[in-house]
Structure formats: C-alpha cells, structure tokens
Amino acid sequence: MQNNSVIDCPSCATRVNAPVIGAVHDPDSESAVVLLRCPSCNNPLLGLTQLYQTENNDWRYDHSERLWPAPSTVELNVSIPESARRDIKDAQKCISHSIYSAAVVLCGRALERLSKEKAPGSRTLADGLTELKNQNIIDERLFQWANALRKERNLGAHATDEEVTKENSQDVLSFTIAIFEYVYTLSEKYEEFIARKTVKK
C-alpha cells in the first residue's frame, strides 16, 4: 500500500504529497478517510480519498479532498444548475491555490449563467442584473452586491495594475454562493412552503 496522498494544504496554500498517518477504510466501497501530515509545515490534514489498484496489483490512495481544516470545496445545493456549481467549485480550488484573479473570473462566469437563465434577453451582465432586480428575483441589497462583484470580476479579467486580493476573492466567492442559494435554494423552499399552505386551505 502506498502511504501518501496528494491534498491541498491551507497553511502552505499549495498542493502537497503528504504521508498518510492513519486511515479508516469503508468496507463496502473503495473510499477511505485519511489522516495526513503536510511535509512542509507538519500540520495535520484530514481527507476523503479513494483506493485504486495499479497494473502491478498494488493498492494506492488517490488524491484526497480535504475535510479538515475547512473543506477545500463547499457542497452546493443540487437545485443550483450543474454548470454554475462547477464554476463555483473551480473558483474555490483557485483560491486554495492562491490564484485569486481566476477565482473572481469564474465567479463572474457563474453570475453570467444566472443572468442568461433568469433574464435571457439581456445583452450584458449589468443589464441582466438590472432585469433580475426589476423582476424581483433579487432585492436591492443583492443587486448592489452583485454590481460590486461584477466590477471585481472585471479586475481579474482585464489587464490592469490593480491586484485582486485574497480577501476580495473570498468575499466575491461568498457572495456568489449566497446569491445562488437565494435565487435557487431559498426561492424553491419558499414556493414549496406556499404550495403546501395552499393545499391545506
């Protein structure tokens, strides 16, 4: 058994090939929860991984998805379109690797997907956000927040001297998740609640 697995270390802000200190294997599948130690900073890491067999019939640990500290990706509700979930997860990975400008661009792309689906006649993201507000899909506060995100996205997408900081990219990511949860998840739950109330009457 290979005793290493590749995992993102948040302290080092890089992907490391870390030794496995301990593991708990699922007897019904080829998954395992592994305790690793970063070879650079020696901090403990907890990950979820899969076992696979090589051509030489050796069992190895695949790359690990970090569970602790702070998962490298946050699970998003399945009501959010898959393409947008993929953009957001890629943005999360970019932040974990200190690629902040790419993270805000990916968040901007996710917002464009939202705009095209909910306001299909809009030519630009700015027009789409305005239409979302006019349709009461988002409120005034979310509209202002979305505009701030759009401007930050432009910094990452265009050749400017202004740098996208870690803090700004994390704020942009947090907002992107919040607006998608609001538009898709919370709205869906509200509509289900109203439907149940209507049936009871």
Image (cartoon, rainbow, N blue to C red):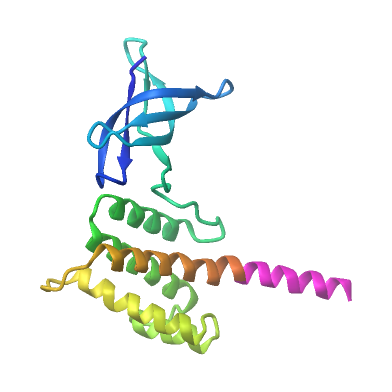
Q: Identify whether 21 is placed above or below 8.
A: above
Most foreground residue, 54 or 149 = 149
Location of residue 87 in the rendering, given as x and y in whole percent from the top left corner: 37, 58
Q: Residue at x 29, y 46 (%)?
A: 11
Q: Which quadrant is the N terminus positioned in?
A: top left
In this rendering, position of residue 197 left or right of residue 97: right
Residue stretch rendered in magenta on the structure: 187-201
Q: Determine the main secondary structure of the stretch shown in magenta.
A: helix
* Vertical placement of residue 9 versus 35, above or below: below
Give the left or right position of residue 80, taking residue 94 as reference: right
Is residue 49 within the magenta segment? Answer: no
Q: Farthest residue in the front direction?
A: 42
Image quarter where the C terminus lies is bottom right
Q: Is residue 49 above or below residue 115?
A: above
Residue 27 visible in the picture: yes
Task: Estimate the x, y position of residue 125 in percent, counting from the top left.
Answer: 35, 79
Closer to the camera in the image, 104 or 137: 104
Image quadrant assignment for residue 110: bottom left
| Along the line of sight, the residue nearer the viewer: 123 or 106 | 106
Q: Report the residue at 23% width, 56% height from top.
A: 99
From this viewpoint, is residue 113 visible? no
Quarter occupied by residue 155: bottom left
Q: Residue 134: x, y in percent?
A: 50, 89
Q: Residue drawn 36% across and 35% down?
A: 44
